[in-house]
Image: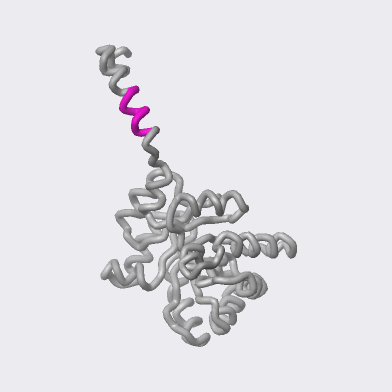
Amino acid sequence: MKLFIDTADIKEIRDLNATGLIDGVTTNPSLIAKSGRPIAEVIAEICDVVAGPVSVEVTASDHATMMQEGRYLLGIANNITIKVPLTIDGLKTCRVFADEGAAVNVTLCFSPAQALLAAKAGATFISPFVGRMEDIGAEGMLIIKAIIDIYNVYNFDTNVLVASVRGPHHVVEAAKIGADISTLPPAVMRAMYQHPLTENGLKRFTADWKNTGQSILSSK
């Protein structure tokens, strides 16, 4: 499974990208707004740091303006993925950009029916929001599994990108059912490698080694 980081915080992106574990970045207007900087400046910097796809969302609601915004955003860097909402205008925009060879992430997906339309529109990525589905009592992972099953039956090329991830458990469950990607807030990414038994074991090993009075480097 690929792991994307869901943030526009360049410091967080630089830090996590240095691990070599990050495959891409997703952003949205809310995340960009938090940066307090011009969108083109933020996106250009992110694209310079991360080699993988960087999803940047249009803010318009009508097809014509989505196209204008999308073309502007695509001009910022070569690894831009245009992000559009799962509306009829968003799907129309997706179809045009897909036909032109641009990568498109269709976001705000909450049902298999919506996901089917996005795949038919040529989406590179579909972003079902598992956390928000669970907020209203829906079985988020069952919906994601249904999307994966439909895509597999018809051999759609659209990647299932699990969004609105609230914790490592969502990442694990998504991986178990075969999702292509999870996009994670930085805090969730860090929580994935943390475990109290790992920390306790490391403290024990460190203490035992210190008691020997040795140093690996001084033994050269």
Residue drawn at the location 49% of the way across and 71% of the way down: 83
In the visual, does 127 lie left or right of 189? right
Q: Position of residue 123 (x, y in %)?
A: 60, 69
- Residue 203 magenta: yes
- Using the rendered image of the protein, determine whether residue 40 is visible from the camera's viewpoint: no
Which residue is most to the right?
153
Q: Position of residue 93 (x, y in %)?
A: 56, 80
**In terms of depth relative to the viewer, which is nearer, 53 or 142?**
142
- Residue 116 magenta: no
Residue drawn at the location 59% of the way across and 55% of the way down: 179
* On screen, residue 62 above or below 48: below
Q: If the image is split into quadrants, where does the C terminus sit?
A: top left
* On screen, residue 61 above or below 21: below
- Specify start and end residues of the magenta stretch as a single range: 198-205
Q: Position of residue 12 (x, y in %)?
A: 33, 54
Residue drawn at the location 52% of the way across and 85% of the way down: 63
Residue drawn at the location 58% of the way across and 55% of the way down: 180
In the visual, does 31 lie left or right of 177? left
Q: Position of residue 130 (x, y in %)?
A: 51, 63
